[in-house]
Image (cartoon, coloured by chain):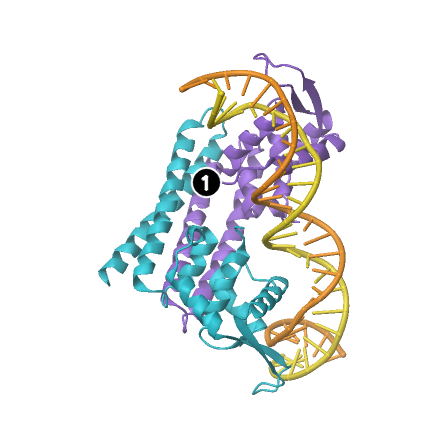
Chain colours: A purple, B cyan, C orange, D yellow
Amino acid sequence: MRSRSESLEFALLGLLSQGPLHGYELRKRMATIYGPFRALSFSVLYPQLRKMLLAKLIEETFTSAGGLSRRSRIVYELTKTGREKLDSLMQSVSPDTFEDEGFEVRFAFFGPTPRNNRVKILEGRHRKLVEKAEIVRKDLAKIPEGIDTYLVEWRRHSLESAEREITWLEKMIKSERKSL
Amino acid sequence: MRSRSESLEFALLGLLSQGPLHGYELRKRMATIYGPFRALSFSVLYPQLRKMLLAKLIEETFTSAGGLSRRSRIVYELTKTGREKLDSLMQSVSPDTFEDEGFEVRFAFFGPTPRNNRVKILEGRHRKLVEKAEIVRKDLAKIPEGIDTYLVEWRRHSLESAEREITWLEKMIKSERKSL
DNA sequence: GCCTACATGTAAATAGTTACATGATTGA
DNA sequence: TCAATCATGTAACTATTTACATGTAGGC
């Protein structure tokens, strides 16, 4: 399981921790996390909410009409269990945290994440990227036989991007440590 | 259909255009295209080869033993139809060409791609990325209310990466034009 | 003798997208 | 009145991963 839904629960708990929201609004907020090109579809969101209802992490309230008399909405809010779950997740550092999706979501809720854990997450991500970059570098060093020159150029560019992210993380880690 | 298998056929045709290969070897070559972290699994590769056999794009030959007496392998090679298909794909510029995966694969076979088409592909990709970056920039300009500062930082970094790719493409386009 | 790489596949489970269905409200 | 956005979902399809199954050859 290295799917989006893994980080989705965390993200939803995080969003709802700031106050109750309905599905449509949750989707929009998710867009600010994932960016404008990877919108969360309703057919993923609603079943996920149902799962979380079953697990008693959230509760639903039917709102017949909002202040501006809209269509009735279903408003979700965290239960005590949900809040506890979020807290424990905030303090944990699962291996998934260092993957692309996982990291992005963790980072989106970095403000409410305990200080010392922030550094751990950044360091883990850093380690992971350094390892990957190393592999790509070796790979690049050994292939250039017969392979299209353009492809090599492309891979070099990709490696540079990875290196830039590493540098960025290093800056982040430094500034986090300073604020400790 | 915006899946990997869309570009997969192109990639396989491209690889086989240089000479006959067997499945296992094709997988390894694909790794040099997609990079070391997105290996093509056999359960995608073999059915794809079967599809291409049915479409008469490739032919199979059973090799009982290679020069070094290995297990019998199935060697695939392009048919005349397959070669024609590849040629026509090389000269075409489908919209898919400008997507991440599609572009990567097209780029991997840029050498054998007709000169004028290379520029078209690069320009299309450039246009696409500029549009996307513009959207992200606007998005970034309007959200900073209440959103976690860390997240904003992350998005800014992502935008910079996109901008770097745009610059890279511009360099590529310039050097392609020069060689025309 | 065991581990790794070679070599070819199938089956089942999971994940994800797209199309469909329905209906309210708001602004041009 | 017409399109866009709000709002909640289901069904069908497509894609991808993981586990299974089987066997060979070479190096340590």
Q: Position of residue A132 (x, y in %)?
A: 51, 57
Find residue B99 and report its horizontal and vertical position in percent.
45, 50
Horizontal arrangement in the rendering, residue B52 relative to residue A48 (left or right): left
Q: Up-down: is A118 above or below B37?
A: above
Relative to A65, say whether A164 is above or below.
Answer: below
Instruction: Specify whether residue A17 is in view.
Output: no
Quarter of the image for residue C10 reads bottom right
Q: Is residue B144 left or right of residue C3?
A: left
Residue occupying the point 63% across, 14% down: A65
Instruction: Provide the chain ID for the residue under circle 1.
Output: A
Q: Residue at x 46, y 44 (%)?
A: A169
Going 38% across and 35% down the picture, which residue do you hit? B137
Task: State the SS at label 1.
Answer: helix
- Out of B122 and B34, give the one closest to the viewer: B122
**What residue do we see at 30% from left, 60% from top?**
B116
Task: Identify the amino acid type marked 1.
Answer: Met
Q: Which residue is mark 1?
A: A172
